[in-house]
Amino acid sequence: MPITKSVVQNMRLDIDRALVEVSRKYGVSLSTGNATFTSEHIKFKLNAAIIQNGVVVDPAVQEFKRYATMYGIPQTALGTKIQIAHRDFIISGFCRRKRKFPVMAKDARSGRMFKLSVSQTLAALQDAVMISAFMSNLKKGA
């Protein structure tokens, strides 16, 4: 049987279902990551993360907490909604290995992940603070 894209997709679903039991047994979150395949071979990445207080520990969040201030980004920016090019993003993590675009952000509408530069992020955070201050002044005046 040759391996096709639909076979890989179905296999991923079956593997994820099987990983649920192993996840419960060891108290970690397990899921299949990216897959590469040819007609004779499949290679899946396996992602594992510790669960603390019922929440999966995300490495990108841990890196944000550890390194964001070194780049001038306040730790409180994690989870902040910012706007870049008329699109809303939510700051969701940090990846130091991506030197040019280390800030991870999720598109508020589609949920897709994007990489942002530090300067883009700082400018968007500054705009968000200015808009927030402007809005609070409007409310006080009303």
Image (tube, rainbow, N blue to C red):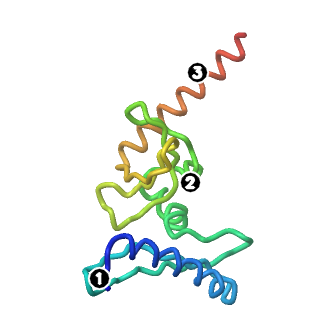
Dot 1 or dot 3, earlier in sequence: 1
Q: CA distance from mark 1 to mark 2?
A: 49 Å
Q: Nearer the viewer, mark 1 or mark 2?
A: 1
Residue position marked by numbered label 3 in the rendering: 134
Q: CA distance from mark 1 to mark 3?
A: 61 Å
Dot 2 or dot 3, earlier in sequence: 2
Look at label 1 and name its amino acid.
Pro
Total marks shown come to 3
In this view of the protein, which residue sits in the foreground, 7 or 19?
7
Give residue 101's position: percent from left, percent from top: 33, 55
Residue 59 to residue 139: above or below? below
Dot 1 or dot 2, earlier in sequence: 1
Look at label 2 and name its amino acid.
Gln
Give residue 90's position: percent from left, percent from top: 52, 46
Who's the residue at 63% across and 87% down the image?
22
Instruction: Please state, as top left, top right, bottom left or bottom right, where the N terminus lies in the image.
Output: bottom left
